[in-house]
Each structure stands twice: as C-alpha cells, then as structure tokens.
Image (cartoon, helix red, strand yellow):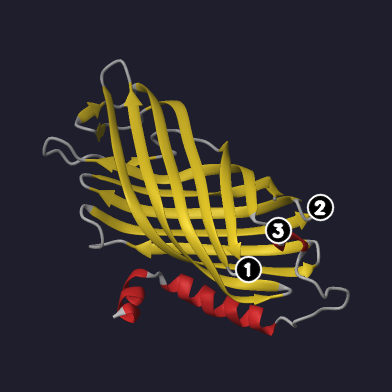
Amino acid sequence: MLYRFLRARVPSALVIALLTTAAVVLLLPAHAHGQTKPGMGEKYRVEVLTTWWGSRPSGSVESDRLDRIGSKVDLETDFGFEEQRFREFRVTAKLAKKHKFRFQYTPLVYTADSVLTRDIDFGGETFPVSLPVESELSWKVWRYGYEWDFIHKSRGFLGVLVEARQTKLVAEIRSLVANAGVTAEAVIPGIGLVARAYPLPDLAVNFEMSGMKVDGLLEGVEGTNLEYDLSAIINVTGNFAGLVGWRRTNTDLRIDSDSGSLNFKGWYFGAAVRY
C-alpha cells in the first residue's frame, strides 16, 4: 500500500534523482587524502541560515466568481512583474547525527503598475483593455520538515525529507474602475531528497529536491508541487559559512475556485551561523 501511494504521489523526476544521488554517495570513499574527519560544517546543534533570492516569476493565476469563468492572468504580460530580491529564513535543529528538524519561511511579494492589453475577468470583476492597473502577488510558504540521513559518511550524506508546507497565495488588481483580489491557503504535504558531498573539508555541495501530487489527497485542493535547490557551501569556520546556490520551484495548484501555475527560479546567496 505504501509503495502504491508513493508511486502515485511522488513525481518520477524525484525518484530518478533519489536513485542517482544514492549511487553517487555510496561510491564516495570513506576517507580522502587529507580528509579523515567529517565535513567542517556538520558539528552543530542548531543552524540558522538566511538567504537573498533573486527571482523572476512566470505562470498565471485564475479566479472564478459568481458563475463567471475567470481569465488566465499571466504574471509577466498582464501583471508586468519583474525580478525582485527576497530574504528567506531557514532553521535546522539536529537531534542526532542522522535526525534533523527543519523550518523554512519564504515570503515572495511582487508589485507592478501596468496597462492592460486585453480584457480580463478576475475575482468576479471585469477590467477592460487599456486600463491602468496596480497589481500585487504575495506567495508565502512556511515549511516544517523532518530529515533522516539514512546514509551518512565522512564525505557526505543522503537523506529523505518529509514535510508540511503551509502555502498562502494573495493576488490583487486595483484600478479606477474596480478592485478585485483572491486569497487561497492550504497545508500541502511533501516528500523529498537531501544530499551533500564534501569534495574538500571546508567545501560542501548540497542538493535538495522535493514535491508531491495532491490530487484527491486534500479536500478542495488539486495539483503538483516540485522544487529543486543546488548550492555550494563554504565553511569559513565550523560555526560560520557562506553559500551560493540556484533554486527553482514549480507549483500548479487549484484551491476551491482559485488556481495558479507559479514558477520561480533564480540565484541566491546567503550566510549560516551554527551553535
């Protein structure tokens, strides 16, 4: 039964990545020349990390109201959103060598002024072509997870991640003619893979991938979420590190009468403090 559940819910790309990464980690030698101790950044109880992520949104949002089918509003061509930089927070608490609790907060807020190039039905209101509008998109995600590193070696580890994502979407259009907005919120489960390798004692390469199909799993919620995160971590000391990475998240969800196909991707940099 568990196998059938995972087969139906876990995207195939995540399964392929899990098997490939497991093979790579298993092939790592237990010790390398000049590296007989665990990576410099692994001895901690709590790690607090903040990043600055520059992301340009793509995709669309749609809202049906009052028996009217809403327009599929494009985030770039209709709303006019451009790349912006956001601050993100992550906290990891290590209970034991292979067991961690994780928290992550990602607040994405975009605003733009534009002139509509077509008629748009949104939130039960009609916005005509050539109308100047102010648009705002807020996409906030709180992630609560548990990580088990079932393979743990001196030069890296491979783990599985089980998490709950509290997701809140707010989209608004304001104009002289009318104002309209939608709010959609849901707690979405996720399953993921976490892998880290140390090519050098003070340099770690980290890869994460998580996602799940939620069709029929939650009442009133349908869709798929998939996220990739690749980063390089430079450990200045055991208690402080800098990092640079690239991240992409693809979310295609319908919550009741509102739906969104939202894609965010871009480079980020940050710093971590460990205790």
Q: Amino acid at mark 3?
A: Ala
Which dot, 3 or 1, sits closer to the camera? 1
Residue underneath mark 2: 236
Residue 198, horizontal then vertical, whole percent: 74, 69
Q: Which residue is mark 1?
A: 97
Counting other residues with Cα less than 10 Å from the Cα at mark 1, is it few (<14), some (14-19), or many (20 or more)? Answer: few
N-terminal of the two: label 3 or label 1? 1
The residue singled out by tag 3 in the image is: 232
Residue 116, horizontal then vertical, whole percent: 36, 28
Seen in the picture, residue 167 relative to 1 is either above or below; the reply is above
Which of the two discs, 2 and 3, sits closer to the camera? 2
Is there CB contact under 8 Å for labels 3 and 1?
no
152 to the left or right of 234: left
| Residue lying at 49% horizontally and 61% vertically, measured from the top left | 146
Judged from the image, the secondary structure of the residue bearing numbered disc 3 is strand
Q: Is residue 167 above or below residue 156?
A: above
Distance between mark 2 and mark 3 Cα atoms:
13 Å
- The picture places residue 265, in percent across and down from the top left corner, at 54, 50
Whether pointer 2 and pointer 3 mark residues with C-beta atoms closer than 8 Å, the reply is: no
Residue 171 in picture, x, y percent from top left: 35, 34
* Quarter assignment of residue 76: top left
Q: CA distance from mark 1 to mark 2?
A: 21 Å
Q: Are marks 1 and 2 in contact (CB under 8 Å)?
A: no
Question: How far apart are the alpha carbons under marks 3 and 1?
Answer: 21 Å
- Name the residue at the right extreme: 34
Instruction: Pick the residue in front: 79 or 89.
Output: 89
At label 2, the amino acid type is Val
